[in-house]
Image (cartoon, rainbow, N blue to C red):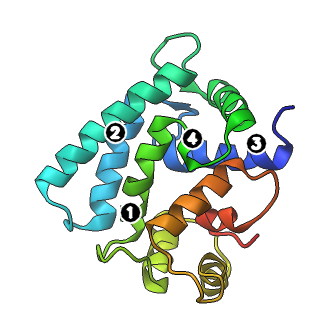
Amino acid sequence: MGLNDFQKQKIKFTFDFFLDYNKDGSIQWEDFEEMIKRYKEVNKGSLSDADYKSMQASLEDEWRDLKGRADINKDDVVSWEEYLAMWEKTIATCKSVADLPAWCQNRIPFLFKGMDVSGDGIVDLEEFQNYCKNFQLQCADIPAVYSVITDGGKVTFDINRYKELYYRLLTSPAADAGNTLMGQKP
């Protein structure tokens, strides 16, 4: 069974928002280089040179893994069609975060740090507001979206909550709390 239209829409969001930084309709190594530049701008020097070198090495590994899984024609470019085909195969067997592709799992700490600019391990409302603004998410009611993320203040928005939401964003066949990473309520 293939992905439904809603799942395809969410996968398209991850393609456009998280990977195709130069907006040319495909993913290439240059998009990862642009990601590093954007990350530096958003975090305004809060990470050391060693952190950025580590991030670059991690992104190089992610690119190799993504390319190995999705670049069907081996042209060093991952098209939207190739990316979608990869996710159709992945989601069919994915039962938890541990089942996500390695490149995707490795991305989680990097993406979380992009939100947690204070580095305290928790994304507060102000940091989430800045994330939505900095990444130009169309979010009409940020406090309401943040309330979904934290289940009305009962759950801390830490790396574990982020992993849960990221997994749900990628795999859920219907609108749920995973949508909050797109700045949307379920």
Numbered mark located on residue 10 in the image: none
Distance from the alpha carbon under mark 4 to that under mark 1: 20 Å
Question: Quarter-wise, where is residue 110 in the image?
Answer: bottom left
Q: CA distance from mark 2 to mark 4?
A: 16 Å
Location of residue 24 in the rendering, given as x and y in whole percent from the top left corner:
53, 34
Q: Position of residue 86 (x, y in %)?
A: 64, 28
The type of residue carrying mark 3 is Lys
Name the mark on residue 100.
4
Q: Secondary structure at mark 4?
A: loop
Mark with earlier residue (3, 1) = 3
Q: Residue at x 42, y 62 (%)?
A: 112
Mark 1 to mark 2 CA distance (whole Å): 14 Å
Callout 2, which amino acid?
A: Leu
Q: Give whichever of discs 1 and 2 has the lower sequence position.
A: 2
Residue identified by numbered label 1: 114
Q: Are marks 4 and 3 in contact (CB under 8 Å)?
A: no
